[in-house]
Amino acid sequence: MSKIDYFFLFANRKSAFALKEQLEKYSLSGNITFVTDREEVKSGCPELDILLLPGLGSSESVRKIVCSARSSYTLLYIYDGKLSLDGNSLERMLSVAKATGAGMVYADYYIKKENSLEEHPLIDYQQGSLRDDFDFGHLLFFQTEALKEAVKEMTESYSFGGMYDLRLAISRKYPVVHINEYLYVDAEDDARPSGEKMFDYVNPRNKEVQLEMEQICTSHLKAVGGYLTPDVKEMNFPDSLSFPVEATVVIPVKNRVKTIADAIISVFRQKTNFPFNLIVVDNHSTDGTTEKIQDFAVDKRLVHLIPERYDLGIGGCWNSAADDSRCGRFIIQLDSDDLYSREDSLQMIVETFYKERCAMVVGTYRMTNFQLETIPPGIIDHREWTEKNGRNNALRVNGLGAPRAFYMPLIRKLHFPNTSYGEDYAVGLRICREYRIGRIYEPVYLCRRWEENSDAALDIVQINRNNLYKDRIRTWELQARIKMNENHG
């Protein structure tokens, strides 16, 4: 019979002994080890098998855990929560692991909230699931042989990225399988709304962690054949191509009567040495937004575009603007909630196209509340993008920044996916596969956070839908890069 070794984070003496007593009842149970970084725990609990680790997220800790695993399978739970798990759940994970040959298995779970249980579904792992914050839950089930093979490939030592390095190494040789069944009960570790969590990876306090994660992901891309060298194509902007204006600001909008006027005024305050216009793609608003836009019709720079189709997402609205005969050489983003932070934002963006001969420009923004007061994390400059490795690291992070601007003829060729989430990320990944992306590292944009933001407080179903789509975008892009590298030898 296959046995399972267990590794649990030591929370306190009482819960540790209770958990040990519970698990010893099951015939599947092998060794039960508690891990900690506190020396006094090891000396104070001689009856328990205690593994002292230097740092729970480090490569050294991962190696120590794997070296201690002796049974055919290993269960890892290094979270200070109140886990509830029974023998049937263990048998189910073991059965799926055997049936699929998985190196790693994870399952949906319930979150205990006072006197009720809340479902916490997860999403399937795929080739493009390269985010270091991919949600596996807190309980991970491994084939021990896969663990030991993966550790042999972990040639570098990291202070924070040990588990990330481990699961990428496993995924290169073994399936990573999601059991979409609720197999255990756990505590919630981060109750912040989705609109706050989404900016963690660009928080300057996390810089050291992010640099490690970038290095791990880049090594993985090299191992699977998806790494891109820094060499990129430079754009030419021939005078032979004529455009009605040099730049077009595009605002896709639906039902933003409270903010659309501010956004339009922000555009018309821009000072440039070239002609520009504004295409507002009014996606059949019903709340008075249409009338607000029409208030600005006296300014001939305004193009009020109402699509014939009723099935357009934000990406489809962008395509409508790019394909319009009044669109300029460069198209520049402005969300209907947001504002340009200075009067020369458009000038800076267009100058960057010519200076860096790039196909896309990404700026820097400042997070504000509705009253334009700065809120955490403040300035988002996406400095994880570098000339040397940005196009590889783009497959790990969840976005490229804002505002985004594009060379219009290229967009007419590529087009955006007709979605309302991830459409800009998909095009950015496609562009940087071949072309340079230019960067502006000083704020040119204000991103206003308020209760009506589309991503302010998403439920777990919508979060999963969004993450699954972006992972799929990454999968397609990674596959395209691998194929491109193979064709180029």
Image (cartoon, rainbow, N blue to C red):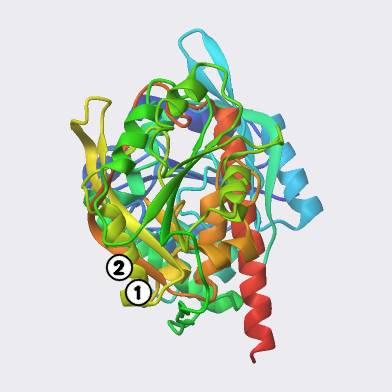
Q: Where's residue 400, x and y in %?
A: 42, 56
For the point 35% across and 35% down, the residue is: 263
Q: Is residue 447 left or right of residue 110?
A: left
Q: Could you say which disc has been placed on residue 354 in the image? A: 1
Going by the numbered disc 2, the residue's amino acid type is Glu
**Snapshot quadrant of residue 117:** top right
* Residue lying at the far right of the rendered structure: 99
Mark 2 neighbour class, 10 Å CA radius: few under 14, some 14 to 19, many 20 or more = few
Residue 41 visible in this rendered orientation of the protein: yes
**Snapshot quadrant of residue 286:** top right
Q: Which residue is mark 2?
A: 351
Going by the numbered disc 1, the residue's amino acid type is Tyr
For the point 45% across and 85% down, the residue is: 231
Q: Is residue 396 above or below residue 197?
A: below
Q: Nearer the viewer, residue 410 or 381?
A: 410
**Circles 2 and 1 in contact, beta carbons < 8 Å:** yes
Q: Where's residue 239, x and y in %?
A: 46, 78
Mark 1, secondary structure of its residue: helix
Q: Is residue 25 left or right of residue 217?
A: right
Mark 2, secondary structure of its residue: helix
Q: Nearer the viewer, residue 181 or 212?
A: 212
Q: Where's residue 372, x and y in %?
A: 21, 31
